[in-house]
Image: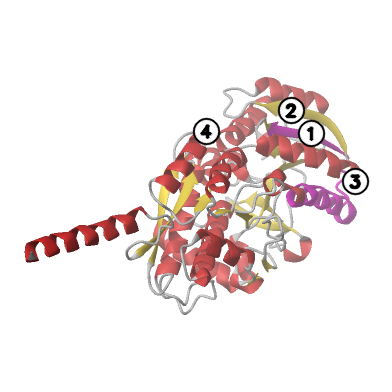
Amino acid sequence: MKKYVLALFLILALGFILAACAAPGGGGGSTVKVGAVYPLSGATASTGEDLKQGVELALEVVNNKHDDLNLPMAKEEGVLKGKKLEVIFADHEGKPDKGKAEAERLITQEKVAALFGSYHSSVTKTASQAAEQAGIPFVNAESTNAQLTERGFKWFFRTTPHDGTFAENAFQFMKDLNDQKGAGLKTVALVYENTDFGKGFANLAKDFASQYGFDIVEEVSYPAKTQSVSAEVQKLKAANPDAVIFVSYVSDAILYMNTMKELGFAPKLVWANDAGFIASGFLENLGKDGEYITSREVWAADLAQARPLVAQVNKLYHDKYGEDMNGNSARAFTGMLVLADAIHRAGSTDPEKIREALKATDIPGDQLIVPWKGIKFDEKGQNELGSGIVVQVLDGKYTTVWPFDLKATDIVFPFPAWDAR
């Protein structure tokens, strides 16, 4: 009889353990699991590595006490009374269908409490659909297609400003150059890869060009990860715009710059919608040929002049990885802190409680390494306190040149001819 009771007890105990392991929410044991879906191979793998490193640094802040850092979660040690936050990374390879499949795997097999990612707007679109269907919070830190927060989703939250903000910034910047520096910019060409990211930005840019009095004289849409852009650059050269706006991931950004040099095309202004033009692989491959481009940004090392927290975190990053942060790693770092903070305030890995905590997020600007007023989500899940800056590559560094009251140095204008450098 005693043997029977003992056996029954062991069976019941094993059942409870297995049930706990199978339960959704990623909170079993001493860790809380979240999933991050990023491009860790393929054409944007170097960007994926930047993003992964930003997330990993955020985990160090969350899981260890940093009383000297005025950051969310820095003075805690883990989440939910000391549990370690663990991130399980998945590779979407830049493919929307792969991104959705990996999101579903993380939810059903890894039992994560929330999802994070996915850089490419087209992949974020599908991966977040999987989260929405499963009722799992999805925090996005880098994708900027404006439509992502217009889908009526209840589980999707985006910390970065979107392309509505950035597209207007481009024309505000050019107008300020005209008004304050007599730049004489009138005509613009748009160059964009033909996914949700590129097409969405181009549509917004055309609207803002009209509002700010600029003429779009050429529009070049091309397939992402293309092998040659000679015909496209010849088309741009023939149109002879004052400014060219690029929306490209890193391999395409490098290819365009090399082809522009080869064909001797140098407009007065090269402006990029971030992405490939600020990825670590851009200057690593181009060196001096990457100089003088301008790009919208949300982070620059020189912001430390006004916000010492930037220097503190960048030093941690540099000590760990041997390089400075960039806008991608800074946004991933910030977004993961926001998710960790929400899980901690939720007091649980229950998805609904985490969603409610995300809705209640209100992080002030002085606790961020990005130059925003703070992080607070509107009814669509969009951070309503974000903003952009413009940087220029000068002496191998991304240097803030706009808004002019935040500038670290004056812009070099116009973009120098290739044979005059």
Q: Secondary structure at mark 2?
A: strand
| Label 3 vs 1, first from the N-terminus | 1
> Which label belongs to residue 97?
4
Which stretch did the figure color magenta?
Answer: 165-192
Residue neighbourhood size for the residue with mark 2, other residues' Cα within 10 Å, grouped as few (<14), some (14–19), many (≥20): some
Determine whether, in the image, residue 414 is placed left or right of residue 131.
right
Q: Are marks 2 and 1 in contact (CB under 8 Å)?
A: yes
Judge whether 315 appears above or below 220 on screen.
below
The residue carrying pointer 4 sits among few (fewer than 14), some (14 to 19) or many (20 or more) residues within 10 Å by Cα, namely: some
The mark found on residue 102 in the picture is none
Q: Residues within 10 Å of mark 1 (few under 14, many from 20)?
A: many
Q: Secondary structure at mark 4?
A: helix
Gap in angstroms between the C-alphas marked 2 and 1: 8 Å
Is the residue 244 above or below the residue 370 in the image? above
Q: Which residue is mark 3?
A: 211
**Residue at mark 3 to residue at mark 2: CA–CA distance:** 21 Å
Residue 166 horizontal/vertical position (percent): 74, 50
State how far apart marks 4 and 2 are (Cα).
26 Å
